Image: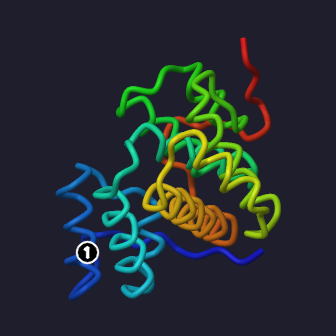
Amino acid sequence: MVKLVALDPTQTTGKVRELLAQVQGQLGIVPNMMRTMANSPAVLEGYLSFSNALGGGVLSPQLREQIALAVAEINSCEYCLSAHTTIGKMVGLSEHDQISGRLSFSDDPKIDVALKFARAIVVNQGKVTTDYLNRLRQAGYVDAEIAEIIANVILNIFTNYFNHIAETEVDFPKVLPKDAKVA
């Protein structure tokens, strides 16, 4: 199996060192996924730019994390489930909201529609019917929010696949795919 090496930030130079220092400054740590992406400064910079741009968008941090959890669960990405469970706690998601997010539903009807749409994007490889868009609009979502839901799904598919191929070592408290159950 192909495996990519996580770089030691103290052993890097140039653009890679600069990007990893930026991550350290923002998060206080440099997660293994980003250390592994750093094998290509273009990949790391692209990921950070996309992630930071969406972080400044119109979707709440809670919904972004629920989308990330849903996509990671569908794609069985242990690294991303572990990371986004930790981040979800940091942005105030309850354990119930985290688990229901992983299972692509919410007790909140508006969030539920967004999670079902996110699931449909992944499961149907981006080919969703206009019925999903109609449901989103009926729930009160505007085009900017719909575009960001799509973008968040795509960003998380990228990280899921990257971590599958790289076999990134999980450096968050481990969360296993397919064990989410609603109490």
- Residue drawn 76% across the image and 54% down it: 131
**Furthest-top residue in this view:** 183
Q: Is residue 135 above or below residue 110?
A: below
Among the 4 quarters of the image, the one containing residue 109: top right
x then y, percent, for residue 29 = 29, 52
Name the residue at 38% across, 42% down.
60
Q: Which of these two is toward me, 139 or 118? A: 139
Residue 156 drawn above or below residue 19: above
Residue on which the image places disc 1: 19
Task: Say whether residue 54 is left or right of residue 119.
Answer: left
Q: Is residue 126 left or right of residue 172?
A: right
Q: Secondary structure at mark 1?
A: helix
Residue 49 screen position, x and y as percent: 33, 73
Q: Quadrant of the N terminus?
A: bottom right
In the displayed structure, would residue 98 be above or below residue 65? Answer: above
Please state if 43 lies on the left or on the right of 124 as rendered. Answer: left
Quadrant occupied by the C terminus: top right
Mark 1 nearby-residue class (10 Å; few <14, some 14–19, many ≥20): many
Percent x, y of residue 16: 29, 81
Q: Residue at x 70, y 38 (%)?
A: 104
Residue 153 in percent (x, y) is at 59, 60
Residue type, label 1: Leu
Residue drawn at 43 percent across, 61 percent down: 144
How are the residues colored? Answer: rainbow
> Based on the displayed image, in which of its 4 quarters is residue 19 positioned?
bottom left
Eyeballing the image, is 15 above or below 147? below
Left/right of residue 109 with respect to residue 1 in the rendered view: left
